[in-house]
Image (cartoon, rainbow, N blue to C red):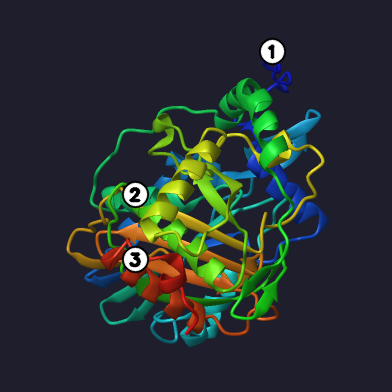
Amino acid sequence: MSAARPDPPPRTAPGEAEATFLQQGMWVTEQTTGAGTAYHMPLLVHLRGDLDADALTAACAAVVERHPALGSVVAETGGGLRLVPGAPVPVRRRPADGPIEGEPDDWPEAVREEVFAPFDVDGGPLARFTLYRTGPGRHTLAFVAHHLVFDGHSKDVLAADLAALYNGGRPAPPPALDHGRAERERVAAELPAAREFWAGHWREPGETVVRGRALRSRRAAAGRTLRFRADLAPVAGLTRFETLLAALHTLLAGYGNDGVTTAVDLSTRPAEAAGHVGVFVNELPVASRPGPEETFGGFAARLRAGLREVYRFRRVPLSRALPRLRPHAALAPVSVSYRARTLPDPVFAGLDCAVDRTVPNGSVRGALHLQCADGPDGLAVALRHDPAELPEARPVADDLRLLLERAGRDPGLRLRDLAAPR
């Protein structure tokens, strides 16, 4: 079978770039059904000490110049969807009526309104900075961007660049990159094999039972978030992500699901985009059929093999491989995103800094989503859930933490013993 030829790209005007397939899908979702705050990506940078507020706001403006994606919107031009310049990205200073700590319900009302305010998807801006003074020697920089121009790895890039610029550095500009154009070429080359693979592997996900409740939602909805930390002990022969995913599938099997399908966000970020702010991710399904007599280590190795098969096509959107796929905000009721932090924590000269990377956005895509950030200080999980489908998430978090602890201690345990209902 010969490789498909890429569609001829529209002519590009100065300041424009091709929209990626993911950006096209999100844009269509926003235009047709809306997604509320499901695509909001907040980040909080807590700073303690003698802050130079002028230097920090100047650093925010410089970051926007450094990463044009932050000032872009997706628009129909020349017969296609393009990234074009949008309204200027605001950098504001405001007082807060109290500390911005804990969960959003504990924040001052003005802060909640600013962080969760809707974006103008058509005109922009799709990002905003607000610096709050929360007390003597205490500030919080609240940043929020739309997923159209931002992803999880971008949080670390943004924080590192802000610190470097605040400290008076002048980091070299990231290399020029037209990810949309490069993606079009890669997908065209890989599409025939991806279509053949998914024709034999795709099954429309049904309901997923979680603690006696049937989860069916694949829409975007208002959601609650439970944040917790978990011990993710290394298991021989597995990456930390593979251990986590195997534990999640084991847990879902223990809840009574003979076959388990979860949607997984996989990075498509090429090496040359390591220092770029943007969106480089693709959601694909991972299916398994855990056997109760299998050991955790044996099942995880089998899941790993299946996951590696999916990895071969991680850069091809499922909607391209399966043109008749019905659009949903999530591919399956249960989904997971995992990111290993590879950049060091930012250092702002003369200040204590704490970066909150798992800030709730007030929504969830699907019925249950695990947002995981793994770093030197351990695994941080934000468990987002649709309360109409799963009113309480704490028991699920407790079950997962216990399972991870037991599997890490003894990967030879059988699944029926490891994930036995309590």
Residue 238: assigned label: 2
Q: CA distance from mark 3 to mark 1?
A: 45 Å
| Residue 360 visible here | no
Q: Position of residue 364 (x, y in %)?
A: 62, 68
- Res. 44 image quadrant: bottom left
Closer to the eye: label 1 or 2: 2
Q: Position of residue 275 (x, y in %)?
A: 38, 39
| Residue 148 visible here | yes
With 165 as the anchor, is 60 left or right in this view?
right
- Res. 258 image quadrant: bottom right
Q: Secondary structure at mark 1?
A: loop
**Amino acid at circle 1:** Ser
**How would you rate the neighbour count of disc 2 (Cα within 10 Å): few for under 14, some for 14-19, many for 20 or more?**
some
**Who's the residue at 31% across and 69% down the image?**
231
Earlier in the chain: of badge 1 and badge 2, it is 1
**How would you rate the neighbour count of disc 3 (Cα within 10 Å): few for under 14, some for 14-19, many for 20 or more?**
many
**How would you rate the neighbour count of disc 1 (Cα within 10 Å): few for under 14, some for 14-19, many for 20 or more?**
few
Q: Nearer the viewer, residue 303 or 38?
A: 303
Proximity of marks 3 and 2: CB atoms separated by less than 8 Å: no
- Above or below residue 43? Residue 89 is above
